[in-house]
Amino acid sequence: MADPRPLRSARAIPAERPPELTDLTANVRAVGEKYGYDAAHAEQVAKLSQGLFTTLQRLHGLDPAWSVLLEHAALLHDIGYFVQARRHHRHSRYLILHDDLLRPYPEPWRRFLALVAGNHRKRPRRAPRDWPRSRARNAQILAALLRVADGLDYSHDGGARLAKVQLSGGRVHLRVAGLALRPGGRTLERKARLFTRVFAVPLVFSAGA
């Protein structure tokens, strides 16, 4: 992997470390099942987002503990379809905030989870004003990764795989296997806009084995 030092300004602001949330993954999946989520898509987006988190760690600078929040957001990002397809991201946010199965999720991390999951599409919602700047920044980082992962499985066929992720030349090069990339493809381009804004670097997609 190329030296990413020219991208250092995009790193996360040092922040508090989130608590251990792995034990709540069963609760998260139970919520998904309750609202009839597409489990295969949710698991694929979770897998892709975790791959992006790991391979781009030198870019975002987040502690691995944040990856659990990203995984949970990926698993629940589409549960709002249970209410309505058109604005499902808003309904996903609402269900995460209010479902009793997530009552064990500690505050403010339940609100953090809802914000990241709800920001997987459309115009991102701002973090609450009472949040530390670092936490708000980290929510943006996770939402940016989630959007790209969701875009890679936009067809819900589960075929996309991260073949190579490289930082070089002031860009992030993402080689994807198992996905037919169309020149000027609007879906991935749209999904990558938040990533480019958050990290201040272009995200370039290419097909690869």
Image (cartoon, rainbow, N blue to C red):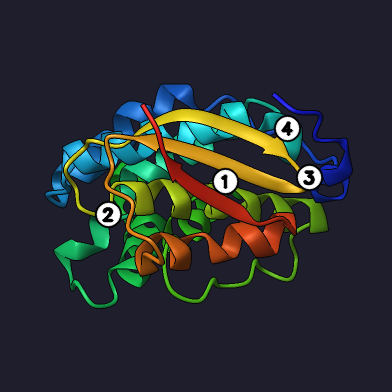
Which sits earlier in the primary sequence, circle 2 or circle 3? 3
Comparing marks 2 and 3, which lies closer to the viewer?
Answer: 2
Q: For the residue marked with disc 3, what is the amino acid?
A: Ala
Q: Is residue 54 left or right of residue 161?
A: right
Taking the view exactly as shown, the residue that stands out farthest to the left is: 36
- Give the amino acid type for the residue marked by disc 2 in the picture: Tyr
Give the alpha-carbon distance from disc 4 to disc 1, as whole Å: 11 Å
The numbered mark, 1 or 2, whose residue comes first in the sequence reads 1
Identity of the amino acid at label 1? Trp
Q: Which residue position holds label 3? A: 12
Q: Residue 67 location in percent, x, y?
A: 55, 32
- The span from disc 3 to disc 1 (Cα, nearest Å) is 18 Å
- In the image, 86 versus 163, the foreground residue is 163
Secondary element type, mark 3: loop
Q: Residue at x 19, y 72 (%)?
A: 85
Residue name at image x 56 percent, y 32 percent: 165
User: Gap between marks 4 and 3, in whole Å?
Assistant: 12 Å
Q: CA distance from mark 2 to mark 3?
A: 27 Å
Q: How far is disc 1 from disc 2 in space, using C-alphas?
A: 27 Å
Residue at image mark 4: 17
Question: Eyeballing the image, is 140 above or below 152?
Answer: below
> Which badge, 2 or 4, comes first in the chain's sequence?
4
**Image quarter in which the C terminus is found:** top left
Look at mark 1 in the image and give the residue it sits on. 109
